[in-house]
Image: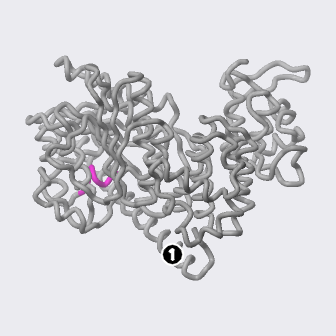
Amino acid sequence: MRPLAERLVTRSDIARLAGVNRPAVTNWARRHDDFPQAVDSVRTGTGAADTFRASDVAAWLATRRIPVSGLQAGELEGTTYGDRFLASLGAGSRTSPQTVLTHILDRLRGERSTERVLDLLIAVTYVIAVRPADELSRSGDVWWAVRRALAEDGIEAADLGGPVGERWRHESSAEFAAQVLAAEGWDRDTAIEAFDWLVEQRSGIEGRHGSDLVTPQAVRRLMAELLPASDDGTERTILDPFCRTGEILDTCAAVERERAPGAPLALRGVSGEAEDATLARMRLTLRDTGHTVDARGFWWPEPGQRYSGVVSNPPFNQRSEDPYGYEGYFPYGTPPRHSGNFAWLQLAVSALAPGGRAAVLMPNIAAQSANPAERAIRAAMVESGAVEALIALPPQLFGRATSIPVTLWLLRSPTGAPGDVLFVDGASLGSMADRVRRVLSTADVASVVDVCLRWRAAQAGGKAFSGRSGFSASVSPGTLAARDWLLSPVLHVAAVGPGSTSDVAARIGRLTDDLARRDEQAREADGRVREILSELQKEGWWRA
């Protein structure tokens, strides 16, 4: 069977495969800006017909649930037009894992909060993945069997589904969930896919604060691919000092296995919340990856703890008193108390073994803040050779969770001497998956990885690097000093365009003012949203 991405369908095909009439497809295309774009056309008896990639259509239809009145025999409530489309193509089962789980969520949602129902489903799905499919359905006490299976894997069940004292509230729900999931007969890979989806749904519900953000899949892949591969067969050690639910470590493990199957790999994660730490352990256990995950909040590695790679998406712009017990540890200066951004960046550098690399997500303001302490830290990091590259990423990658634009910092074990810094302006990459969320394609990720690898090769060979106009530029430390240690990629990539020195300075000034204003507006908007949600929750109009 041809891959889905290579199959083309017309609007008439879409209507037939999705089980709707032809005008419905026309209405979808007219009313929804995110409806897939036509890629070609074919001759028909009545003229030309646009054609669409079946993979694009399936992904779009997967977001549209079929009304109960429109369900066909054998379709569960929650089935999407995407499920039906794929089944009609013979490219998938009748019901996707997401649809099955959505059906269970809808049935159980009234019994408890959505978050607690997701916890229960996460626990049951995990056990389905690591135990024989019928083990739970054969148990006389399903919730007890789930807890026993988790305990055997060293996972604290109290962090998933509430304390033991609430056990009676889970039994009927767990039994229903186990029966439905066992009947699906999922293999391990499908159960893992379902587990990942559930964790993302849980984080999406909680994602009102910086500590709750889920790092998008394409961004995780970009971070993992920018960690250099090991070429001597020694054990790779990767640290995430704020690992959330372990999603970045998981992607790093997948990339490392692609590069060197069977090579030794050890992962270390530190999470700010016990529940997140539990989810991270479950995620990495499902991948059969050696790991250690602790729930410790801000933490500084001991002198002997050094890693070949560090990755992280830490909380943005958060005031915290915790890091300041480590004031003597900051090699480039104590960060201001209003924001811990440069505490996390310095932690990443300090945790690197010689030759190690780090990839850390930061809000754009960290690269261009006018705060004297932060500017001095940026200068010191560049002058020590710890800063390798900064990559501006497009806005709206985190959907509804936050509108704050981000920059990926590539750091290295300090060389002791200042070196050129690569800047990549990827702010225009990606496409809108829906009205609030932008996604990076595989080609987008590959374009950034390619320019970074070419720049590294040029640096290693002592050769000049010619960036791509409007996309990348290599900038000397002297130039950075002359520009007051502003490290925004947008500024430096724009500055390599045509124009006099005075024109460039003026352009940088205008862009700096504009970026600072937009960052402040984004922070204010996020703060107001949190306040509104908190007020609604207190009044009983909204709950997680």
On the image, the x and y values in percent for residue 515 come to 35, 53
Examine the image and state in which quarter residue 489 appears. Answer: top left
On the image, the x and y values in percent for residue 274 come to 41, 60
Residue 254 is left or right of residue 337, and the answer is right
State the residue lying farthest toward the bottom.
539
Q: Which residues are magenta?
A: 364-369
| Mark 1: few/some/many CA within 10 Å (<14, 14-19, 20+) | some
Residue located at (46% from left, 57% from top)? 156
On the image, the x and y values in percent for residue 178 come to 69, 51
- When the figure is inspected, residue 159 is found, relative to residue 313, above or below; the finding is below
State the residue lying farthest toward the front.
140
Q: Is residue 271 magenta?
A: no
State the residue in front, 261 or 382: 261
Q: Quadrant of the C terminus?
A: bottom right
Residue 48 is left or right of residue 381, and the answer is right
Q: Could one spot residue 32 in this view of the protein?
A: no
Q: What SS does tag 1 mark? A: helix
Q: Which residue is mark 1?
A: 534
Residue located at (58% from left, 63% from top)? 115
Question: What colouring does the structure picture have?
Answer: one colour
